């Protein structure tokens, strides 16, 4: 028996790890344990419920207005006894959250092997995204198995000196979740409300966009609604009060804007599939939208999802009101430009990445045992 411990703590990690958990549970010879740090609470539980995953451990670290110090201290302290008790052959972490970084660091201190899912994404700008660019580079120093979603992410790792033998190009498991969730006969009150209008889906949450950038983003959205009578906007707001207070202040007075609670991934991804345009600073949404043929304006100064830019479905819009507004106006007014961006392509995988990762893990761990 080979023992695998999977650790995650936030919504996007959960969405991308649950398909892998489901896959590994079908494999013989694997003893699988799941630990959530609870860096997120409601937003994490929604995903676990949707995928019917019950973790073996919950470190319950989340506190209101948590700082990076809180997350780091509490994860390191609370994960140590679990790692010591379970003593797994490998720990799998995902992406670039503080949960993933702290877990990898704890494994390094305890000499436990780390496998990194979604390895090799880079902007090479430590301030954007902050602190995620640091987190993922640091995890790459530690990880012995690197599951890179694309060739580009593999090349980043090779350039940084990682051994080619430690890297596997598998696609992104986020697309596995999308494949499992998208339904042709989907309906939802939001879609009923938006009937006859072009629906813009908005999300915003990045730490480095706190304050002025969020104000710019929300003001640009407000201007769009004021100037286009045929659009409606839905914003499933992140639970972070720092974003919600500003969103409510700037966007709450229009009957063509709905500020709603975060959606579980099934509802969110199906609403995304039925939207006209997406405005977001999210990472995962940049990977999902291209396979649905939905144009995305990325409200950040950098992106690590270069494949989506090259494919033409993503455009960097920055965080200035005027530029976001102008770029959205172009897409709302120029059909040719819109159609150029709405090609349905899939640079991030085929929806079967979990199977590939499970095969690789089983082969390597069986060999060892
Ligand atoms: C974290 C990740 C980020 C990821 C994002 C996904 C880090 C440093 N950042 O950022 O990479 O893109 O998750 O959403 O790891 N909150 C709740 N309930 C919840 C979730 C959050 O109340 O279910 C509130 C808490 O007040 C918390 C705040 O949101 O203090 C921010 O959460 P936190 O995990 O610190 O940062 P995110 O911006 O969510
Ligand atoms: N998502 C969701 N409900 C929402 C908003 C987003 O399920 O209300 C999903 C989305 O489909 C994607 C993931 O959450 O899979 C992205 O998470 P987020 O934007 O919070 O984090 P990031 O990807 O930027 O790290």
Image (tube, rainbow, N blue to C red):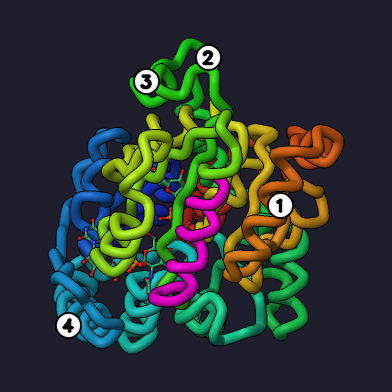
Residue depth check, mark 2 versus mark 1: number of the one nearer the observer = 1
Within 10 angstroms of label 3, few (less than 14), some, or many (20 or more) residues?
few
User: Splitting the image into 4 quarters, where does residue 215 fall?
Assistant: bottom left
User: Which mark is first along the chain, 2 or 4?
Assistant: 4
The overriding secondary structure of the stretch rendered in magenta is helix
Q: Which residue is mark 3?
A: 188
The percent position of residue 278, horizontal first and vertical second, equals 58, 44
Residue 220 lies in the magenta stretch: yes
Q: Which residues are magenta?
A: 209-224
Picture quarter with the C terminus: bottom left
The residue tagged 2 is 184
Q: Position of residue 282 (x, y in %)?
A: 51, 57
Q: Which residue carries the number 4 mark?
A: 77
Whole-angstrom CA distance, mark 4 to mark 2, is 45 Å
Q: Mark 3 against mark 2, which lies toward the viewer? A: 3
On screen, 360 above or below 258?
Answer: below
Cα distance between the residues tagged 3 and 2: 12 Å
Q: Residue at x 17, y 83 (%)?
A: 77
Between 207 and 178, the one lying in front of the other is: 207
Q: Is residue 333 left or right of residue 231?
A: right
For numbered disc 4, what is the local secondary structure?
Answer: helix
Q: SS class of the residue under badge 3?
A: loop
Whole-Å distance between the Cαs marked 4 and 3?
42 Å
């Amino acid at each position: 028996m080979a023992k695998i411990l999977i650790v995650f703590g936030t919504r996007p990690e959960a969405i991308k790890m649950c398909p892998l958990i489901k896959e590994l549970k079908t494999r013989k010879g694997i003893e699988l344990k799941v630990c959530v740090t609870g860096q997120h609470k409601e937003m994490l539980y929604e995903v676990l419920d949707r995928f019917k995953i019950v973790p073996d451990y919950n470190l319950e670290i989340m506190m209101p207005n948590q700082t990076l110090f809180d997350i780091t201290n509490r994860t390191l302290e609370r994960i140590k006894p679990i790692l010591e008790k379970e003593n797994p052959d490998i720990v799998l972490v995902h992406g670039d959250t503080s949960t993933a970084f702290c877990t990898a660091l704890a494994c390094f201190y305890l000499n436990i092997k780390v496998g990194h899912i979604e390895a090799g994404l880079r902007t090479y700008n430590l301030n954007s995204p902050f602190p995620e660019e640091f987190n993922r580079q640091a995890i790459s120093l530690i990880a012995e198995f690197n599951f890179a979603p694309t060739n580009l992410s593999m090349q980043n790792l090779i350039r940084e000196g990682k051994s080619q033998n430690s890297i596997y190009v598998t696609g992104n498991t986020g697309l596995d979740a999308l494949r499992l969730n998208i339904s042709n006969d989907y309906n939802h009150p939001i879609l009923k409300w938006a009937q006859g209008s072009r629906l813009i889906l908005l999300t915003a949450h990045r730490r480095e966009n706190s304050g002025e950038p969020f104000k710019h983003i929300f003001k640009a959205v407000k201007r769009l609604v004021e100037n286009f009578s045929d659009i409606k906007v839905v914003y499933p707001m992140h639970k972070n009060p720092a974003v919600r207070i500003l969103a409510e202040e700037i966007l709450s007075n229009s009957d063509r804007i709905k500020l709603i609670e975060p959606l579980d991934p099934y509802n969110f991804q199906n609403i995304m599939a039925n939207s006209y345009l997406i405005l977001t600073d999210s990472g995962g949404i940049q990977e999902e939208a291209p396979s649905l043929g939905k144009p995305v304006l990325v409200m950040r100064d950098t992106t690590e999802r270069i494949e989506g830019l090259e494919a033409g479905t993503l455009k960097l819009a920055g965080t200035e009101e005027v530029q976001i507004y102008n770029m959205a106006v172009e897409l709302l007014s120029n059909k040719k430009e819109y159609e150029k961006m709405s090609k349905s392509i899939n640079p991030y995988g085929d929806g079967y990445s979990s199977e590939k990762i499970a095969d690789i893990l089983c082969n390597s761990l069986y060999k060892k045992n």
